[in-house]
């Protein structure tokens, strides 16, 4: 006997929703749990069974922002390094990507492979020589040193993502502009770039997120002056082993920019990931 | 005369039937100046980025290789000097190195396989949900945008801590007892694999979901009319169609897994002992905790070689598609 079609359909959609709900819980719950924890007192954090209803407190945030180990300087460091790295990356990546997508020049294929290969490099292989060189020239704990090494992962990534956006523009546009004897540069600036505004925005978001989240380079090359918030988070746990509520509050603040950007730009992020996957660019 | 062909290997951008626009008189000289002008413009746009990459990635790598041929111990600078292949010889009889190599293999293969299979299964399921996919996408974005170091710390404290962590809350309430997830060598390895899989499965899921959504529905309709079962439809239609995307996702996930550092560093620091010390962590600890930079550099060289070989084969595989 077959079940009536509507009952089967209902059962199937129920199962689907259960799976989807579980999925949602597994991915969102640790973050939501962290959010919840950040409003608890340390005593409530360690309570068993866990307390779901509790008097929320803002003490953790107050402490993390204005207390002895305030993360405000770290947020500032992250902001400076990420912004600098993003601007520099885009300045170098956009022209290069246009050339790779559109122009003919010798050894084009080799240049493509080269950029791709640099993207594959494991960071731990780069941090050792950077550390040695920066130590020699007194560049440790400086914005310029950290920004430079951030280019090693953001530049190849941005070039490849932008190449795929440039490739989507119809050739007719620049041909028409060139026929009108607009110079190549003016064509790029006035005709092509407006076409890839969306791509530039997506790439900028990705580059910024990756720079903000970077840890290995920051922990080795940073110091008391330049200490991005990811390093501060890590130090937090070694300094204050059991103060999880405070850690949670710090983590929420540290991650608020990327969470906000991520949620606001989620459609574009999915598209960026997919473009990267279809065309093969992108590391993260 | 094109520098490259459409549909060429790997991802080098394809020039899609682009012929020079007929500008000016159609003389050979006119075309030639046009070509050289285009080349000059390309050089102007391309060289700054290439020079930055050369100075910031390639030059450091040469320096890394050079250092790997040296004794360079920041704690004992008096013993520094050229070492030839000493570091590599030492490596061959270093059990901690072989252990880290094995862990790298386990970590990379298990996380990539899990991410792709779980991601694909979920994408196939979610594709059938008519509404609410947006909510799921938002939830899936969350782990991806978080810093791996914060993910590691979150898991270490709120999720995996004995007694009060989320996982122990579940196992305790089910009467399964409490575990020291990050303190026991084997559980720690499982835990760091779980952390990585948790953070990056959404990537595979989102990309494959987007790919599945672009598949032509009429093919499935035809297959259904031919009485092909769900399994057959998946095996003979879906899988071949999404194969390129699956391979690219695998390449990207592999590269990420091979350069994984922060989440493990935050969750276990490579411990207990060296039970979660993948090659990355071993190279880092050797260089920056034990200050033996020469040996650390040679370990990093091995990782570099592995990454390059793997990417080469993966891209060959992709070209074969």
Image: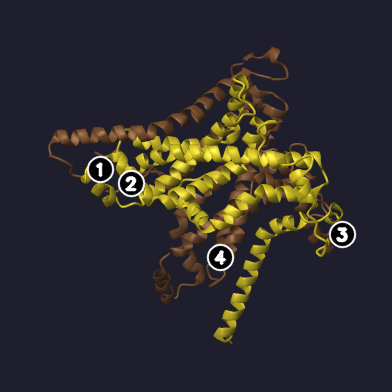
User: Chain A appears what colour?
Assistant: yellow
Q: Identify the residue under disc 2.
A: A190
Q: Where residue B178 appears, x then y in whole percent?
A: 84, 55
Chain given the colour brown? B
Q: Identify the residue under disc 1.
A: A182
Chain at tag 2: A
* Closest to the observer, A58 or A252: A58
Res A48 label: 3
C-alpha span from label 4 to label 2: 35 Å
Q: In which image quadrant can residue B284 be found?
A: top right
Res B134 label: 4
C-alpha span from label 1 to label 2: 10 Å
Nearer the N terminus, badge 2 or badge 3? Answer: 3
Q: Is residue B276 visible?
A: no
Q: Secondary structure at mark 4?
A: helix
Chain at tag 3: A
- Please indicate whether residue A176 sits to the left or right of residue A221 in the image: left
């Amino acid at each position: 006997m077959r079940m009536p079609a509507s009952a089967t359909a209902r059962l199937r959609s129920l199962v689907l929703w259960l799976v989807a709900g579980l999925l949602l819980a597994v991915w969102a719950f640790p973050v939501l749990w962290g959010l919840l924890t950040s409003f608890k007192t340390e005593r409530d954090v360690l309570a068993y069974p866990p307390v779901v209803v509790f008097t929320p407190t803002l003490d953790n945030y107050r402490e993390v922002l204005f207390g002895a180990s305030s993360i405000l300087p770290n947020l500032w460091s992250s902001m400076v390094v990420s912004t600098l790295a993003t601007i520099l990356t885009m300045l170098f990546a956009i022209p290069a990507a246009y050339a790779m997508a559109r122009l003919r020049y010798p050894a084009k294929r080799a240049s493509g492979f080269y950029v791709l290969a640099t993207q594959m490099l494991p960071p731990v292989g780069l941090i050792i020589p950077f550390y040695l060189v920066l130590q020699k020239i007194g560049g440790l704990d400086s914005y310029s040193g950290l920004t430079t090494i951030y280019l090693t992962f953001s530049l190849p990534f941005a070039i490849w993502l932008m190449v795929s956006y440039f490739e989507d523009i119809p050739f007719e546009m620049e041909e028409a502009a060139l026929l009108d004897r607009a110079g190549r540069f003016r064509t790029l600036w006035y005709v092509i770039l407006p076409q890839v505004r969306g791509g530039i925005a997506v790439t900028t978001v990705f580059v910024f997120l990756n720079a903000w989240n970077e840890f290995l380079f920051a922990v080795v090359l940073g110091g008391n002056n330049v200490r991005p918030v990811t390093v501060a988070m890590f130090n937090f746990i070694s300094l204050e082993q059991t103060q999880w509520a405070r850690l949670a509050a710090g983590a929420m603040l540290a991650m608020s920019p990327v969470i906000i950007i991520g949620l606001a730009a989620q459609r574009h992020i999915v598209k960026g990931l997919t473009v990267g996957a279809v065309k093969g660019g992108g590391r993260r | 005369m094109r520098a490259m062909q459409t549909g060429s290997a790997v991802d080098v951008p394809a020039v899609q039937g682009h012929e020079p626009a007929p500008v000016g008189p159609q003389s050979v000289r006119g075309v030639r100046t046009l070509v050289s002008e285009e080349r000059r413009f390309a050089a102007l746009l391309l060289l700054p980025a290439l020079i930055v990459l050369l100075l910031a990635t390639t030059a450091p790598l040469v320096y890394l290789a050079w250092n790997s041929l040296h004794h360079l111990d920041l704690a004992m600078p008096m013993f520094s000097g050229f070492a030839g292949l000493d570091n590599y010889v030492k490596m061959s009889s270093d059990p901690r190195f072989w252990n880290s190599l094995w862990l790298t293999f386990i970590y990379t293969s298990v996380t990539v396989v899990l991410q792709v299979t779980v991601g694909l299964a979920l994408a196939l399921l979610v594709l059938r949900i008519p509404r609410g996919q947006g909510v799921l996408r938002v939830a899936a974005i969350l782990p991806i945008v978080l810093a791996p170091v914060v993910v590691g710390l979150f898991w270490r404290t709120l999720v995996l801590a004995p007694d009060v962590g989320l996982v122990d809350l579940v196992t305790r309430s089910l009467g399964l007892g409490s575990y020291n997830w990050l303190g026991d060598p084997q559980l720690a390895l499982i835990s760091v694999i779980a952390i990585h899989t948790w953070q990056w499965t959404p990537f595979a899921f989102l990309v494959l979901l987007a790919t599945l959504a672009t598949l032509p529905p009429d093919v499935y309709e035809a297959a259904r009319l031919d009485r092909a079962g769900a399994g057959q439809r998946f095996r003979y239609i879906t899988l071949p169609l999404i194969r390129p995307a699956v391979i690219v996702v695998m390449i990207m996930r592999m590269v990420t897994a091979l350069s994984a550092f922060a989440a493990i560093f935050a969750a276990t620091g490579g411990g207990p002992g060296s039970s979660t010390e993948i090659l990355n962590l071993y190279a880092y600890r050797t260089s920056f905790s034990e200050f033996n930079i020469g040996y650390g550099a040679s370990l990093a060289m091995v990782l570099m070689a592995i990454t390059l070989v793997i990417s080469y084969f993966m891209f060959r595989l992709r070209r074969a598609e």
